[in-house]
Image (spheres, grey):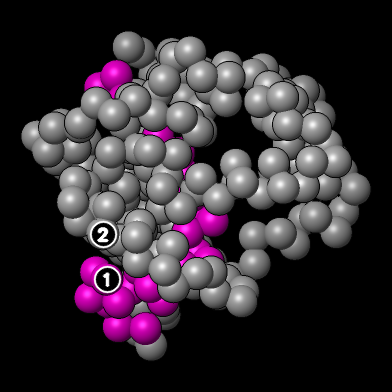
Amino acid sequence: MDVSEAVLSRRSVRAFLDTPVELEVIRRVMDQARFAPSGCNFQPWEATIVAGDKLRELQGKMAEDGMMEAPEYDWTAPNDHEQYQSRMFELAGQMFGSLGIDRNDEDGRNTFSMRNVVSFDAPALLLCHFPRYMKEPQWSDVGMWLQTVMLLLRGEGLDSCPQEFMAYYANTIRDFIGLDHDSTMFFCGLGIGYRDPDHAANNFERSRVPLDDQVKFVGF
């Protein structure tokens, strides 16, 4: 598929088939993603990709240990501003509505949200981490790399689900993959696999802000 098709067909998949993903395909994607841009060519991204029995072992360990009291970084700050909070609420309404989970069904919403622990049954999980001394520009570089990975996965017919939620299990994950707590920042997970094309969570219409509300064109 071309780049435009990859961008438009990419979505956060929240129901995967149990079809395995071949190591050769993931290696090809990760090898190509090395050419993502980064300031000063620092290439700050690092990752560990887990599958099979090891992935199930990690998921069991996360379920056993439970969530940390708070993640090490805050991704909810925009929630303090109505403009951004409304976007989050709109997405939640669309997603949970597609699943038949009522706005007031807190247990139903929490149960589905905890499916993050098993990455919505994705057969492979990328765990993104990097040295703690990386600053905001390098975090941005890591985001560009992750987007590159996700688009390359689409080019292979695969899907993904980026999961900042995994930051609630940073200590368990670092211990499991052998990372030092003091020197390594765990950022997020990325579930990888083939989407279930029939699942409601993969088929609701996603809203986006109109282009002219976000981008100005000057001098054309």
According to the image, label 2 marks what residue? 57
- How far across and how far down the image is residue 29, in percent? 21, 35
Residue 208 coordinates in the image, percent (x, y): 71, 26
Residue drawn at the location 30% of the way across and 77% of the way down: 175
Residue 201: give x, y in percent of width and height.
57, 25
Q: Please name the amino acid that badge 1 sits on.
A: Phe
Does 48 appear above or below 67? above
Few, some or many residues within 10 Å of mark 2 (<14, 14–19, 20+): some
Q: Which residues are magenta?
A: 156-181
Determine the residue positioned at 42% across, 45% down: 119
Can I make out residue 187 in this image? no
Q: Nearer the viewer, residue 101 or 23?
A: 101
Compare marks 2 and 1 and give the one earlier in the sequence.
Answer: 2
Residue 213 occupies which quadrant of the picture? top right
Above/below status of 46 relative to 25? below
Picture quarter with the N terminus: top left
Q: Residue furthest right?
A: 82
Quarter that holds the C terminus:
top right
On residue 29, the disc is none
* Picture quadrant where residue 16 is located: top left
Residue located 54% across and 56% down the image: 165
Secondary element under disc 2, as helix, strand or loop, is helix
Q: Residue furthest left?
A: 24
Label 1 near label 2: C-beta < 8 Å? yes
Q: Is residue 167 in the magenta section?
A: yes
Residue under label 1: 176
Question: Is 201 one of the magenta-colored residues?
Answer: no
Residue 220 in view: yes
Mark 1 is surrounded, within 10 Å at the Cα level, by few (under 14), some (14 to 19) or many (20 or more) other residues, namely some
